[in-house]
Image (cartoon, grey):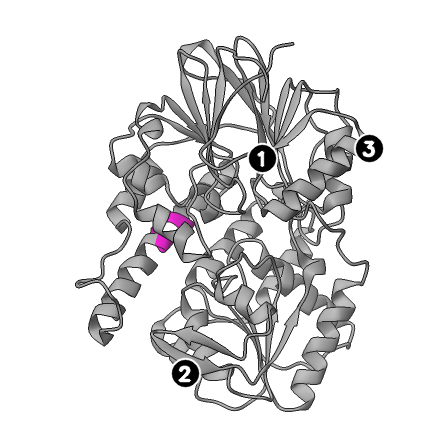
Amino acid sequence: MTAAHSSTLTFLGAAGTVTGSKHLLDTGKVQVLVDCGLFQGFKPLRLRNWAALPQALRGVDAVLLTHAHVDHSGYLPVLVREGYRGAIYCTAATAALCRLLLPDAAYLQELDASYANRKGYSKHHPALPLYTVADAEQVLEQLRVVEFDERFALPGGLHARFTRAGHILGAACVTVEAEDAQVLFSGDLGRDEDVMMEPPARRPDADIVVMESTYGDRVHGGSDPMTALAEVVNRTIERGGTVIVPAFAVGRTQALLVLLHRLREAGRIARVPVVVDSPMAIAATEIYLRRERDHRLSAAECEAAFAMPTYVRDADGSKALDRGDEPKILLSASGMATGGRVVHHLKYFAPDPRSTILLAGYQAGGTRGAALAGGARQIKIHGQYVAVNAEVAQLETLSAHADQRELLAWLGAGARPRQVYLVHGELAAADALRLRIAETLGWPCDVALDRDTVALPSA
């Protein structure tokens, strides 16, 4: 890349993959970490969560969090456990969601380790969680809430500002003002037409843009998500099956509830039971109800849609869902079927040819969700292979990520930067977007390389 400069960027995650977001800006005086996420998906990536804390992260002076999803926030408990005691800046809604997501992620890890030890299927003796609930709760003590569009001070004389990114409640792009450059990190960008969220704000002008590229190689289908959802539900209910939806607890569950409520009110689907089996999704739904100014729905529609389902909070109630044969729509976390209660439901419903597994979001490589999307006829759960006889359907039109067209429009709306770096995308997607940026905008653009350090180009 280009000539040496006092400030550098190091890509410690979400470079060549879509998880583990960690971008380190080093001005030579101050180190600012943007996002601190977990790796998910393929085992070699997940093993990086367990490696020693990268040396580059041991000198961090401030952390900026774009949003609460665990691939952006879920490594914070490790950073804090290993000694970071500085501020973690985020928006109010992101802080509220982190208070749910991080302790829950820790609890699930403790639960999975305990279950593995009881059943004896782990290769590790004993199986241990990556971090504990106590570690996660320490993170919450260090959160510092900043409003959108408020310029705020960082250590070493730097300043930063959050602007709306769409995507999920509280999601932000963040601009860091260093001495030699303004560096903009997109975080995850939302859709122009999203069920729940307003579109991203206009891109702030910046010298360097670090942009996500999750869907950099495709344009989302133009089919109406309500129609596609209705078709899946109706054909499954007609054959007496259950629609089981591995749904992200934050954002996707709430959007699905709104769509299902609209379909029921319009008489387009049968009034079968709708069940949300995820304590975290239930708590997140309550936050959406309280933060009307952070999404596009009216209070009346929120209340009606979120009053529709049955909410299952306890483990006994969750287990009971796998005993009845009555048709229903079951939403349960996690969204890529990597853990949580949905894994137990898949164990029961995947072999049932009457039922449907509905994938309603991006499925990172190496996850059960990706295996199902790829047509796997069996999946491994708790050390055993489970047959997949159920229909598998995917609704990519419900994605909360901008597609190639929307990414290009967002990027092109601001002034020409010195350099664009593409992150948070598989290599094929990122490189396809790089080519489109070169062809349509003619701007300098590189795909970020994993664990690479680049000097920020001068004007």
Q: Which mark is residue 320?
A: 2
The image quadrant of residue 60 is: top left
The vertical placement of 366 against 53, above or below, is below
Sequence order check, earlier mark of 1 and 3: 1
Q: Determine whether, in the image, residue 398 is placed left or right of residue 286.
A: right
Q: Is residue 298 above or below residue 267?
A: above
User: Disc 3 marks which amino acid?
Assistant: Thr
Question: For the magenta stretch, what is the residue range?
Answer: 101-105
Q: Residue at x 17, y 62 (%)?
A: 126
Q: Nearer the viewer, mark 2 or mark 1?
A: 1
Q: Nearer the viewer, mark 2 or mark 3?
A: 3
Specify whether residue 104 is painted magenta.
yes
Q: Secondary structure at mark 2?
A: helix
Side (left or right) of 311 relative to 192: left
Q: Nearer the viewer, residue 68 or 295?
A: 68
Residue labelled with disc 3: 440
Residue 171, placed above or below residue 87: below
**Residue 57 counted in the magenta span:** no
Q: Nearer the viewer, mark 1 or mark 3?
A: 3
Residue type marked 1: Ala
Q: Position of residue 427 (x, y in %)?
A: 60, 45
At 78% from the left and 58% from the top, the residue drawn is 221
Asked where in the image residue 341 lies, by quadrant, the reply is bottom left
Q: CA distance from mark 2 to mark 1?
A: 39 Å
Against 150, residue 128 (above or below) is below
Residue at 57% across / 61% down in the picture?
253
Three-letter code, disc 2: Ala
Please name the residue that numbered disc 1 is placed on: 172
Query: Can you give x and y, in whole percent of width and height, for residue 453 in the image?
Result: 47, 25
Q: Mark 2 or mark 1: which comes first in sequence?
A: 1
Q: Quadrant of the C terminus?
A: top right
